[in-house]
Amino acid sequence: MSAPDASDPGDGPAVAVETGWFRFGVVLAILQLAFLALVIGLLQVDVVLGLIAAVTLSIVGGIAITVYVLWWK
């Protein structure tokens, strides 16, 4: 029994699923970078505002990721 061949047409959907998860990870990384920039900017303006934004956006983002992965993916 040999390893599956990547060029095998029977593996088409599996490759598409892996590509979809890769894109999801890239989008998530970009959103995380934007979140970090926002929190750092808010911390320079006002520490309390930055902390409120960090906690609120972390909770909402975590719930959104969980809902997306469990129900829509």
Image (cartoon, rainbow, N blue to C red):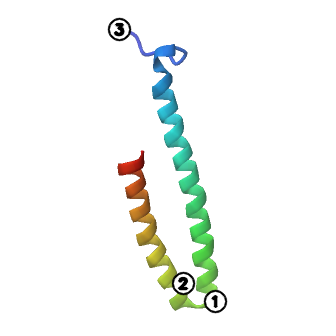
In three-dimensional space, the C-alpha distance between marks 1 and 3, rounded to whole angstroms, equals 62 Å
- x, y (%) of residue 60? 43, 70
Q: Quadrant of residue 63?
A: bottom left
Which residue shows up at 46% across the image and 15% down it? 10
Ranked by sequence position, the earlier of labels 2 and 1 is: 1
Mark 1 neighbour density, 10 Å: few (under 14) some (14–19) many (20 or more): few
Q: Which mark's residue is nearer the viewer, 3 or 2?
A: 2
SS at mark 2 in the image: helix
**Mark closer to the chain start, 3 or 2:** 3
Vertical position of residue 37 compared to residue 70: above or below: below
> Mark 2 is on which residue type?
Gly
Which amino acid type corresponds to the residue marked 1 in the rendered image? Val
The residue where tag 1 is placed is 45
1 or 3: mark nearer the eye = 1
Q: Earlier in the sequence, mark 1 or mark 3?
A: 3
Residue type marked 3:
Met
Q: Residues within 10 Å of mark 2 (few under 14, many from 20)?
A: some
Secondary element at image label 1:
helix
Rendering coords of residue 33 (x, y %): 60, 63
Residue placed under numbered mark 3 in the picture: 1
Tag 2 residue: 50
**Residue 36, image x and y in percent?**
58, 70
Whether the residues at callouts 2 and 1 have beta carbons within 8 Å, the answer is yes
